[in-house]
Image (tube, coloured by chain):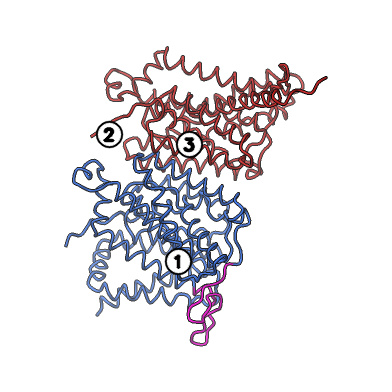
Chain colours: A red, B blue
């Protein structure tokens, strides 16, 4: 068989990189969407949203081990157990995120922005350190179990990984459902109302307190699942991936326009592509990929702080 | 005369308790001393007659009280001549005090939450270390150079940030700290993860800072040299803070904190004030960094992580936003207590996180909130 032409090989490598970038972007999007949603709803930035995702990954590991301990892996097919794990993490992290909101964010709702900001960062620290200290061997990287099928399928000369593909599909579906929820349901309408003007929404009979809790529920659910997906493709998780992850999610949301749902997706795409392409195609660039991503973020913050899709909001007097 | 006597008595009581706290090792004794200090403070606060009486005495004989305090601080290494590590802890407290006083200008006065202390600290340390090793410059020149290098970085960071609002600004500072840490870890000329070693000790008139001080027949460990230098720099920073607070810049900062739009309408150049706060804060962080590098004689990126920024922020929040004395206390607390309770070393960050949350809920202005400005 002829060896593939060099052009062909570069091409296939390029397409594989694109696939990877898409998948990376989709995981960032899951976190960014949550952050932008929270900002839209109650005008705060949840700096520890990434750590909520990290909790999702660790919870996935715990459940996997638990099921193994209960001997369930032999009897029940892999895909069913995987879906059960997804569902469980989805629900548990959703409520955990809401719990965090009730205890740490709600008390500061009337306080100056400074305090909420520091409070969420402190919350992130507490979460990170708790995992580091109380999870066995917490400070070491943990291996994430292979719960997605590890097959590759070939299209011509392309070798695409099935699990990357699944991650992409799941993220896409989740974001799509979230989009439907926000735009087509009554609760979604309430969330949008609160983003526009919380007092007017209250006057209209919307219980803003409960709606905010629901917002955090959905956002944290997505984050929890993002954690599992990230764990699946990186196969190694550490207690501090939440810090970087949260910052990248926030950066993605900001680049796209904070408060704007589509903006979160656009921003995640930009960030994901920059990160993976610079790491692949700039020689010796891999350890600096975060630096490139942040430089782009700083560039946006300086020249277009409202993001790509955001509106320039006048300062309220 | 009786009042002076009482004042000196209470101060001595405090000093003795603090001294014992520093040197005792057993957990129970430490807890006991801590309990004693807290009890004393509560007693003075709650018993109104005692409180007003002491306040009167203090304001009447302020000079004597402060002088006594200064004598104690200067004499401390002599009293601790058998405990070099404790002197080193106090030196650390001094470093954090400088960092926190600088950060206070941004958080307490101008309401900019700056998480880049780790980065500015690193800039000062690495700049002076590299210059010392490659160019052989003396420590005393490097102190201001390290400060200015960090201030330059602060200026560069501050300028583009001025368009950004609160959250974005904090995000940029966090990202900046992480980037600096990444760069320090990966670039070859910063030494990578091993850092820079063999930084020489400073010298003053033939007395190297690495050799112990010989005084009254006692040999005081060499850490005392750095302790005195740190105390001097803390005093300098404190003095600068005081001057700034009552200057146009300090007023401008507080005005910006209260209402940025109104401040701008009043004619205050908001951008200039904010960039000044960045540069000044970073300058002192750089100076502290230089001091740190020359005391440790070996620096690595591990000392300049995001955790450093968090620790300094904790000090500012706990000690009191915009209150210099409170911050000094906060720095002392946050350095001494984790060191004494060694069993909590691992839990340090977790405890700091909880402390921040609790303080924000219960006493958001800090243990010692900002005193009302005196207009005289």
Is A202 left or right of B19, judged from the image as shown? left
* Picture quadrant of residue A183: top left
Q: Which residue is mark 3?
A: A296
Both on one chain, marks 2 and 3?
yes
Instruction: Say if B274 sits above or below B330 in the image.
Output: above
**Tag of residue B288:** none
Question: Which residue, given by chain and number where applicable, does mark 1 sit on?
Answer: B143
Q: Are marks 1 and 2 on the same chain?
A: no
Q: Is residue B157 magenta?
A: no
Task: Pinpoint the chain carrying mark 3.
Answer: A
Q: Of helix, strand and loop, which one carries label 3? A: helix
For label 3, the crowd category at 10 Å Cα-Cα, with few meaning under 14, some 14 to 19 and many 20 or more, is some
Whether residue A62 is visible? no
List x then y, in percent, for residue B311.
47, 53
Work out whether residue A132 or residue A158 is closer to the camera in this orientation and state it.
Answer: A158
**Residue under label 2:** A315
Q: Is residue B296 left or right of residue A141?
A: left
| Mark before the other along the chain sequence, 2 or 3 | 3
Q: Quadrant of residue B251?
A: bottom left
Q: Is residue B65 above or below residue A104?
A: below
- The residue segment tinted magenta is B199-225
Q: Residues within 10 Å of mark 1 (few under 14, many from 20)?
A: many
């Amino acid at each position: 068989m002829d060896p593939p032409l060099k052009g062909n090989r570069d091409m296939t490598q390029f397409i594989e990189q694109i696939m990877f970038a898409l998948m990376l972007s989709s995981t960032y999007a899951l976190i960014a969407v949550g952050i932008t949603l929270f900002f839209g709803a109650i005008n705060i930035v949840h700096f520890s949203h990434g750590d909520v995702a990290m909790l999702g990954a660790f919870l996935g590991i715990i459940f996997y081990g638990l099921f193994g301990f209960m001997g369930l892996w032999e009897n029940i097919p892999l895909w069913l157990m995987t879906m059960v794990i997804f569902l469980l993490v989805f629900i548990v992290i959703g409520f955990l995120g809401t719990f965090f909101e009730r205890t740490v964010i709600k008390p500061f709702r009337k306080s100056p922005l400074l305090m909420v900001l520091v409070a969420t960062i402190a919350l992130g620290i507490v979460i990170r350190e708790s995992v580091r200290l109380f999870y066995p061997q917490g400070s070491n990287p943990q291996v994430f179990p292979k719960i997605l099928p590890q097959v590759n399928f070939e299209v011509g000369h392309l070798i695409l990984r099935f699990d990357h593909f699944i991650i992409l599909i799941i993220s896409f579906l989740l974001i799509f459902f979230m989009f439907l929820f926000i735009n087509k349901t009554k609760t979604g309408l309430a969330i949008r109302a609160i983003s526009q003007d919380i007092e007017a929404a209250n006057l209209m009979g919307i219980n803003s307190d409960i709606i905010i809790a629901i917002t955090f529920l959905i956002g944290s659910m997505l984050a929890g699942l993002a954690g599992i997906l990230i764990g699946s493709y990186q196969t190694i998780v550490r207690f501090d991936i939440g810090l970087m992850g949260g910052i990248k999610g926030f950066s993605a949301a900001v680049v796209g326009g904070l408060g704007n749902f589509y903006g979160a997706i656009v921003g995640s795409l930009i960030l994901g592509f920059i990160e993976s392409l610079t790491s692949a195609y700039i020689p010796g660039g891999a350890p600096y990929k975060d630096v490139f991503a942040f430089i782009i973020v700083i560039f946006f913050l300086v020249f277009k702080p409202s993001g790509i899709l955001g509106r320039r909001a006048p300062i309220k007097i | 005369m009786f009042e002076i006597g009482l004042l000196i008595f209470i101060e001595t009581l405090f000093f003795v308790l603090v001294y014992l706290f520093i040197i005792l090792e057993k957990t129970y004794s430490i807890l006991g001393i801590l309990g004693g200090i807290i009890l004393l403070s509560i007693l003075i606060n709650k018993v109104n007659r005692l409180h007003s009486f002491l306040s009167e005495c203090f304001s009447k004989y302020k000079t004597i009280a402060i002088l006594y305090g200064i004598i104690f601080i200067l004499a401390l290494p002599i009293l601790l001549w058998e405990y070099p590590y404790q002197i080193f802890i106090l030196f650390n407290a001094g470093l954090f005090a400088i960092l926190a006083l600088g950060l206070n200008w941004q958080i307490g006065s101008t309401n900019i939450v700056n998480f880049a202390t780790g980065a500015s600290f690193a800039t000062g340390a690495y700049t002076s270390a590299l210059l010392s090793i490659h160019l052989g410059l003396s420590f005393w020149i490097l102190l201001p150079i390290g400060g200015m290098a960090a201030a330059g970085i602060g200026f560069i960071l501050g300028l583009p940030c001025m368009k950004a609002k609160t959250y974005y600004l904090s995000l940029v500072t966090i990202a900046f700290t992480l980037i600096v840490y990444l760069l320090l870890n990966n670039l070859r000329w910063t030494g990578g993860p091993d850092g820079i070693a063999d930084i020489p000790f400073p010298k003053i008139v033939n007395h190297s800072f690495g050799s112990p001080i010989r005084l009254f027949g006692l040999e005081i460990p060499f850490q005392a040299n750095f302790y005195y230098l740190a105390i001097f720099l803390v005093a300098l920073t404190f003095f600068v803070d005081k001057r700034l607070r009552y200057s146009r810049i300090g007023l401008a900062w507080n005005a910006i904190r209260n209402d940025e739009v109104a401040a701008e309408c009043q004619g205050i150049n908001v951008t200039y004030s904010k960039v000044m706060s960045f540069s000044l804060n970073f300058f002192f962080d750089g100076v502290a960094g230089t001091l740190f590098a020359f005391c440790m004689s070996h620096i690595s990126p591990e000392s300049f992580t995001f955790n450093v920024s968090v620790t300094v922020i904790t000090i500012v929040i706990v000690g009191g936003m915009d209150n210099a004395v409170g911050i000094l206390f906060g720095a002392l607390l946050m350095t001494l207590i984790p060191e004494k309770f060694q069993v909590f070393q691992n839990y340090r960050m977790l405890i700091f996180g909880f402390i921040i949350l609790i303080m924000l809920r219960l006493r958001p202005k800090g243990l010692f909130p900002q005193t009302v400005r005196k207009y005289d």
